[in-house]
Amino acid sequence: MLKKKFKAGVVQFDVKAGQIETNLETALGYLGELASQQVSLAVLPEMFSCSFDNDHLSRHSAQTEQVVESLCRFAGENRMAIVGTLPEKETDQIYNTMVFIDVDGRVKGTYRKLHLFRLTGEHLYYAAGDKIVTLDTSFGRVGLMTCYDLRFPELARALFLQGAKMILVSAQWPESRKAHWNTLVTARSVENQLFMVCANRTGKEDDLRFPGMSMIVDPLGKILSKAGANETSTFAEIDLDLVTTARTLIPCMTDRRQEIYG
C-alpha cells in the first residue's frame, strides 16, 4: 500500500574507517531511535559501513552482503525502509553503491554513484555507475543520489522527469563546503518541486572535518528538519500531496521548453 503521509528520518554519525561492526552497531542504534518514533523511511550517510578506507575496499566489500542482510532484518521487523551506500564489488571493480531496502525487508533496488570526486581520488579506487535510478517503492517513486551528485542538476532533473517525488541522498560532505551543501540541497528541492531527504556524516577523518547538517526539505524549499554537527538522528512529517500542490502552484513541468533545450 502506497504511503502518502509518513515520517522520514536521517542519521548522521562519525563513520569509523574500516570498522564495519562498530559502524553497523551505531547505525542500528540510531535506526532504533527513529523506529521508536514510527519513522517509516531512514537515510544513512555515504559509505556508512567502512567510510573511504580505500586501501582495503576488497575486504570490506566482502562483508557488504552481511551488512545489508542485517539491515534487511531490521527493516522487516520495524516496517522501516533504509537507504545508504556501501562498497560493492563486481568482478575486479568496486562501486560506491546505494541500497534501498523497503519496509518489507527486501532490497528494492541499487544505485552506483555516477560522479566520482576527483579531489579526494575516488576515481582511483572506484568505478563510476552508468545508470540513473528511480524506484517504485512503498513511498511512490523515489530517486537516488550520492554526495557529489548534488552538484549536477542534470541528474536531479532526470529523476524529476522520471517521476520522482522524493530524492534520497547519502553523503560525506566536508565542513569546508557546508554552505554549498545547504544551498544545493535546497536548490534541488525547489527547482524540481520534490522532497529532499539527505544524510551527511559528522566527525573527522584524516584532514577532513564533516559538519553533519543532515536535512529534509519540502518541494517549496522549506527546511522541515535539520541536524546540527553532533551525532544524532532527526525526522520530519512527509505529505506527498505537497508535491502536487507545488507543481500546480508553479507549473514548471508544463512550461518546460523541451523542444529548445531537451
Image (cartoon, rainbow, N blue to C red):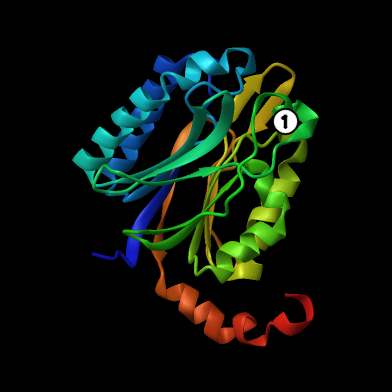
Does 25 sit left or right of 16 as displayed? Answer: left
Q: Quadrant of the C terminus?
A: bottom right
Please give the count of numbered marks on the rendered protein.
1
Check the image and report above or below for 252 versus 21.
below
Q: Nearer the viewer, residue 261 or 248?
A: 261
Amino acid identity at mark 1: His
Residue at image coords 50%, 65%: 164
Q: Position of residue 79 (x, y in %)?
A: 24, 47
Check the image and report above or below for 106 versus 90.
below
Q: Is residue 11 visible?
A: no
Q: Residue furthest left?
A: 77
Check the image and report above or below for 16 versus 70.
above
Q: Nearer the viewer, residue 23 or 220?
A: 23
Q: What residue did someone put label 1 on?
A: 123
Q: Position of residue 66 (x, y in %)?
A: 34, 23
Q: Nearer the viewer, residue 218 or 153?
A: 153
Q: Position of residue 143 (x, y in %)?
A: 51, 57
Q: Is residue 32 visible?
A: yes
Does 114 sit left or right of 24 as displayed? Answer: right
Instruction: Place residue 212 in its image quadrant.
Output: top right
Residue at image coords 61%, 47%: 130
Neighbours of disc 1 within 10 Å: few (<14), some (14-19), many (20+): few
Residue at image coords 44%, 39%: 233
Q: Quadrant of the N terminus?
A: bottom left
Q: Position of residue 134 (x, y in %)?
A: 48, 58
Does 67 sit left or right of 217 as displayed? Answer: left
Q: Secondary structure at mark 1?
A: helix
Instruction: Place residue 65 in its image quadrant.
Output: top left
Residue at image coords 64%, 81%: 252
